[in-house]
Amino acid sequence: MKRMMYAVWAALLLAVAPVRAQWVVSDPTNLAQGIINTVNQIAEASATATNTLDSFNKIKDVYNQGKEYYDALKSVNNLIQDARRVQQTVLLVGDISDMYVTSFGLMMNDPNFTPEELNAIAFGYSKLLNETAGLLDDLSQIVSVTSMSLSDKERMDVIERVYKDVLHYSNLVRYYTKKNISVSIVRAKKHNDTQRVLELYGSVNQKYW
């Protein structure tokens, strides 16, 4: 199947037409680029933060504006196997952003963390997001004009490698979130305040820890 992966990516983008038809008409690559831009902007806002609260408010705004790209991608069904892997990879990046925004938003309301600790936690999320964004750039390169010389196997190998790397970072973010919340729980136990912390994180964020 010559040039199969290019067709796979095109099919992935075109399949979003029922949800966001104007993207396909104006620019078929807008969906993928929008997702990459969102992750880059979130990471940049976090990495250059001088005020944690103001920075996080900006991050939430960027995340909410870009969330439609992820929601549109989630609605795509019945893709062939290789296109499904591309979709899964991008959705994992969406999950990473969601874990960051959701979990850190709760941590901002947790008195068990000092402002300095919150800055450090935000920096950690930023580093992980930066690495993930770089992997998305790798993924986008395989459908560029300059990558058309790749064989079908080489394209599939790149997709599979990027997927596994993004999955690794997704697991790291989940672990990072869990460890930070665990610190709060340990501190809460010392003040007989465990139930409040469990209620803060458990109802919304339980799947992350």
Image: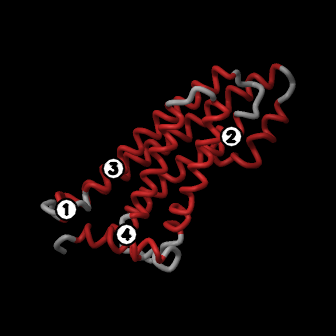
The answer to whether marks 1 and 2 mark residues whose Cβ atoms lie closer than 8 Å is no
Residue at disc 2, secondary structure? helix
The first of marks 1 and 2 along the sequence is 2
Q: Dot 2: within a 10 Å radius of its alpha carbon, few (fewer than 14), some, or many (20 or more) residues?
A: some
Return the residue at label 3.
137
Tag nearer the camera, 1 or 4:
4
At label 4, which amino acid type do we have?
Answer: Asp
Q: Quadrant of residue 2?
A: bottom left
Could you say where residue 16 lies in the image, as x and y percent from the top left? 46, 74
Residue at disc 1, secondary structure? helix
Return the residue found at the far bottom.
18
- Tell me the number on the disc at residue 145: 1
Residue at x 47% of width, y 47% of height: 39
Q: Dot 3: within a 10 Å radius of its alpha carbon, few (fewer than 14), some, or many (20 or more) residues?
A: some
Could you say where residue 111 lies in the image, as x and y percent from the top left? 78, 26
The answer to whether marks 4 and 2 mark residues whose Cβ atoms lie closer than 8 Å is no
- Vertical order, 146 against 4 (above or below): above
Return the residue at label 2.
105
State the CA–CA distance, disc 3 to disc 4: 18 Å
Residue at disc 3, secondary structure? helix
Q: Dot 4: within a 10 Å radius of its alpha carbon, few (fewer than 14), some, or many (20 or more) residues?
A: few
At label 2, which amino acid type do we have?
Answer: Gly
State the CA–CA distance, disc 2 to disc 3: 27 Å
Q: Dot 1: within a 10 Å radius of its alpha carbon, few (fewer than 14), some, or many (20 or more) residues?
A: few
State the CA–CA distance, disc 1 to disc 2: 40 Å
The answer to whether marks 1 and 4 mark residues whose Cβ atoms lie closer than 8 Å is no
The first of marks 3 and 1 along the sequence is 3
Residue toward you, 143 or 197 = 143
State the CA–CA distance, disc 1 to disc 4: 16 Å
Residue at x 46% of width, y 77% of height: 17
